[in-house]
């Protein structure tokens, strides 16, 4: 029997009133937002649920049993709708259920049940059952995996002869950023195996004392991969301090400070590594003269203020005969010489006689920036031997009193690779800034943007080029060091090159000719560029790719709750998004994969003997919105320097627009598209198939509460693989180093790092013991914990 009205009102206490008020507020939010979403062509579920919540809150305030009937309907309707829309996908179900389950639990509390007299206990039990239903669906969804690939790579090593470039590097050493100039990020060491890797312990820790401060750029990072030569480890810190350490103990042997006076308006402050050169017997300079007697072994250091040093590897002192007492000015020949506009963030390729140097320019600042010229210098004297200027009519013209390098010609900010046997250096060419609007670009200036280019080591003349993005309006360049592999095929050994792109494509070419080994057919892409610009009708899509096969829809939007999920769906509907290569516009374009790319400077690791590769792609969305000129976005610079970040409003002076670049985040700061956002994956290079792929990284260091939910996190840095069947990774947004079984991708071991690990590990052996070394210093704009640690692990 239902109680009378006066009795009901008497029993409705404060807690029930609060529950009703929360329900009413939730109803208002969902109704307003749901109508907005529906008007944009999205789901009307939120609007309908909002109205039902308003009615539920009203009846609960009145103490009427109808509140429970209506809310039971919401629970059933929500469960059916959620399963119909996304199936048993935990990450997509959770924000669809969280609010309705929490409100349902509140309504089921005795204090609220006492305020409303339900006709029978059966009604109460049915309500409880309906409340359990979405919880059961969430539990069942944990049994399913999405996007993961379970498989295995071939376990045995192939019968491929050792690669030519590795023959001069002892197994115990790591002589270049990727161990060799082939960029393999691979070591033949096998003391650490998948059976004993779980026993790894910290062997030594070194602290650089190079602490990022308030006067440093936002994009200050500790991304170094150390080198190991003989009994020394060489590395650099963000301010380009160089250290030589004892390989057994990690104790400092020497330190060199180049005196970089950085500025917070610089776009970068980082040092990904140094380069190494050993003088052979009877060495000669490039012009045939005997090489200077000093610096039998030398360390090459580029700096963020546009200089390059040659240091004696034994003492750390500058090599006096190199340039001007040990240094050269890399701004020579440039039309713009402002410090910070041209930066040496990545170590150069060093061959028997040459240093081949590329560099980064400030992105999206103006059309009047330094050239992206690639230059070859004599390794002993620092003399300029050749130049390759990708934006010039005469690509190899050297600077003179009447000639400067071409402003804004495309730059190569990342790492190069080289094959001295073929006499070629491979340049992953980026963009001519600004990146996001190209209406004023010329065919001459765009010949080599977002291309892989092979240059003659001796002359700098172009041998071949392959363009991976035509008329790039998304900054989808080649960010990684290419990896060179002598590939075993049915037609014999083919010298191949693997070039990971921000798009998620991995382009595989014959490194002698630039001809594709893995097809990359030209595919129609969205059209409709901003006024004054145009788009290419097609883009190449490699058949070896991590690019998502399906376009995003508003169903893929995520959130901590159904409220911010709804807001993400509204934002998604407001942006223009027609899949990859949707052109930028003033409405706002969703860029997925985002501007940071599926691949970054970490690249991939390859085991040339086993003919496999390990990759760590990520899929993180960005928004690109062109901003017309106005009072807040002037057409010309009103300050001496650019902003010190690649995130936010970028001026793009010299074009009709500025651009706002930012991650696509919910109101609470979570990425709008659902996780996973980061993976580790294994590729069989003989079939070019992705054999396994698993999400990697937890939320432990990215949320207020240290909850280690394994969601697959964004990352910066790369993998390193060993012949012991283990691959290592320290790039994820949580502060861990991890080891994985190369064959299956199973995680075998992890250790907590004292700071962010946005770096690529390396390995070496000394005194019969194998060490794994990584930098843990964080990344300013990535938001990970900053530090100054270099940590070595070994078996007990």
Image (cartoon, grey):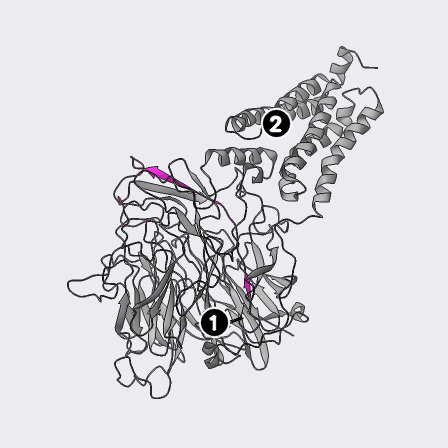
Judged from this view, the residue extending furthest toward the bottom is 282
* Residue 792 visible at all: no
Q: Which residues are magenta?
A: 613-642
Eyeballing the image, is 780 above or below 32? Answer: below
Name the quadrant of the N terminus.
Answer: top right
Q: What residue is drawn where x is 63% and y is 66%? A: 743
Q: Which numbered mark, 1 or 2, is in the foreground of this view?
A: 1
x, y percentage for residue 115?
Answer: 76, 21
Judged from this view, the residue extending furthest toward the front is 491
How many discs mark residues in the rendered view?
2
x, y percentage for residue 690?
Answer: 58, 59
Residue 498 colored in magenta in the image: no
x, y percentage for residue 332?
Answer: 24, 64
Q: Is residue 549 left or right of residue 585?
A: right
Residue 641 colored in magenta in the image: yes
Q: Is residue 275 left or right of residue 742?
A: left
Q: What residue is drawn where x is 38% and y is 85%? A: 280
Numbered disc 1: secondary structure:
strand
Residue 353 position by quadrant:
bottom left
Eyeballing the image, is 111 above or below 401? Answer: above
* Residue 631 visible at all: yes
Residue 794 position by quadrant:
bottom right
Eyeballing the image, is 116 above or below 770? Answer: above
Q: What residue did someone put label 1 on?
A: 494
Kindly report the secondary structure that dominates the magenta region of the rendered protein.
loop
Residue situated in front as seen by the camera: 631 or 410: 410
Name the quadrant of the C terminus.
Answer: bottom right
Is disc 2 surrounded by few (<14), some (14 to 19) or many (20+) residues within 10 Å?
many
Q: What residue did someone put label 2 on?
A: 26
Q: CB under 8 Å between callouts 1 and 2?
A: no
Q: Is residue 127 left or right of residue 217?
A: right
Residue 356 position by quadrant:
bottom left
């Amino acid at each position: 029997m239902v109680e009378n009205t006066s009795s009901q009102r008497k029993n409705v206490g404060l807690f029930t009133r609060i529950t009703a008020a929360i329900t009413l507020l939730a109803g208002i939010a969902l109704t307003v937002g749901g109508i907005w979403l529906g008007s944009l062509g999205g789901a009307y579920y939120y609007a309908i649920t909002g109205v039902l919540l308003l009615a539920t809150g009203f009846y609960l305030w009145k103490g009427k049993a109808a509140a429970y009937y209506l809310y039971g309907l919401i629970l059933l309707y929500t469960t059916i709708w959620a399963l119909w829309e996304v199936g048993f996908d935990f990450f997509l179900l959770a924000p669809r259920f969280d609010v309705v389950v929490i409100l349902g639990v509140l309504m089921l509390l005795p204090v609220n049940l006492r305020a409303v007299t339900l006709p029978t206990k059966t009604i109460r039990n049915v309500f409880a059952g309906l409340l359990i239903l979405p919880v059961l669906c969430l539990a069942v969804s944990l049994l399913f995996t999405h996007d993961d690939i379970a498989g295995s790579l071939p376990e045995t090593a192939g019968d491929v002869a050792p690669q030519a470039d590795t023959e001069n590097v002892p197994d115990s050493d790591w002589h270049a950023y990727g161990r060799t100039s082939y960029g393999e990020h691979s070591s033949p060491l096998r003391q650490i195996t998948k059976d004993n890797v779980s026993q790894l312990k910290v062997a030594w820790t070194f602290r650089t004392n190079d602490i990022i401060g308030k006067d440093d750029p936002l994009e200050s990072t500790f991304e170094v991969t150390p080198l190991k030569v003989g009994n020394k480890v060489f590395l650099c810190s963000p301010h380009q301090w160089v250290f030589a350490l004892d390989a057994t103990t990690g104790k400092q042997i020497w330190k060199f400070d180049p005196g970089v006076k950085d500025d917070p308006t610089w776009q970068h402050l980082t040092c990904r590594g140094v380069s190494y050169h050993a003088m052979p017997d009877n060495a000669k300079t490039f012009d045939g003269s005997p090489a200077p007697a000093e610096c039998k072994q030398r360390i090459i250091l580029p700096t963020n203020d546009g200089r390059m040093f040659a240091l004696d590897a034994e003492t750390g002192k500058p090599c006096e005969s190199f340039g001007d007492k040990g240094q050269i000015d890399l701004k020579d020949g440039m039309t713009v010489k402002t410090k910070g506009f041209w930066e040496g963030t990545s170590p150069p390729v060093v061959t028997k006689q040459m240093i081949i140097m590329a560099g980064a320019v400030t992105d999206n600042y103006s059309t009047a920036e330094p050239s992206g010229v690639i230059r070859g210098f004599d390794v002993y004297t620092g003399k300029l031997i050749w130049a390759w200027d990708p934006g010039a009519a005469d690509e190899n013209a050297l600077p003179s009193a009447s000639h400067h390098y071409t402003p804004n010609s495309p730059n190569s900010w990342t790492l190069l690779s080289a094959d001295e046997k073929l006499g070629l250096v491979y340049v992953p060419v980026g963009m001519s800034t600004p990146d996001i609007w190209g209406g004023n670009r010329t065919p001459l200036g765009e010949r080599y943007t977002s291309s892989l280019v092979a240059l003659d080591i001796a002359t700098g003349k172009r041998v071949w080029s392959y363009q991976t993005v035509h008329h790039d309006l998304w900054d989808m360049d080649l960010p990684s060091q290419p990896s060179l592999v002598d590939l075993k095929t049915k037609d014999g050994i083919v010298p191949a090159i693997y070039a990971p792109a921000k798009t998620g494509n991995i382009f595989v070419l014959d490194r002698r000719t630039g001809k594709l080994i893995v097809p990359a057919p030209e595919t129609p892409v969205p059209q409709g560029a901003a006024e004054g610009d145009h788009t290419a009708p097609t883009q190449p899509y490699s058949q070896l790719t991590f690019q998502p096969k399906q376009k995003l829809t508003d169903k893929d939007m995520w959130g901590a709750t159904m409220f911010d999920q709804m807001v993400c769906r509204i934002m998604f509907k407001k942006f223009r998004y027609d899949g990859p290569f949707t052109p930028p516009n003033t409405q706002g374009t969703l860029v997925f994969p985002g501007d940071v790319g599926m691949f970054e400077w970490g690249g991939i690791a390859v085991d040339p003997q086993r003919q496999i590769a390990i990759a760590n792609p990520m899929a993180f969305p960005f928004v690109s919105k062109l901003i017309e000129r106005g009072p807040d976005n002037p057409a010309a610079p009103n300050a001496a320097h650019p902003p010190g970040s690649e995130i936010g409003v970028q001026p793009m002076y010299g074009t009709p627009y500025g651009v706002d670049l930012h991650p696509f985040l919910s109101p609470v700061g979570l990425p709008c598209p659902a996780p996973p956002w980061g993976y580790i994956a294994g590729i069989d290079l003989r079939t070019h198939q992705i054999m396994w792929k698993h999400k990697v990284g937890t939320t432990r260091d990215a949320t207020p509460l240290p909850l280690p939910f394994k969601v697959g996190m964004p990352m910066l840095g790369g993998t390193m693989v060993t012949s012991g069947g283990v691959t290592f990774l320290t790039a994820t947004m949580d502060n861990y180093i991890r080891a994985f079984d190369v064959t299956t991708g199973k995680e075998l071991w992890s250790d907590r790092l004292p700071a962010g690990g946005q770096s690529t590990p390396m390995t070496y052996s000394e005194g019969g013991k194998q060490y794994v070394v990584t930098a843990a210093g964080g990344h300013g704009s990535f938001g990970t914990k900053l530090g100054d640690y270099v940590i070595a692990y070994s078996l007990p």
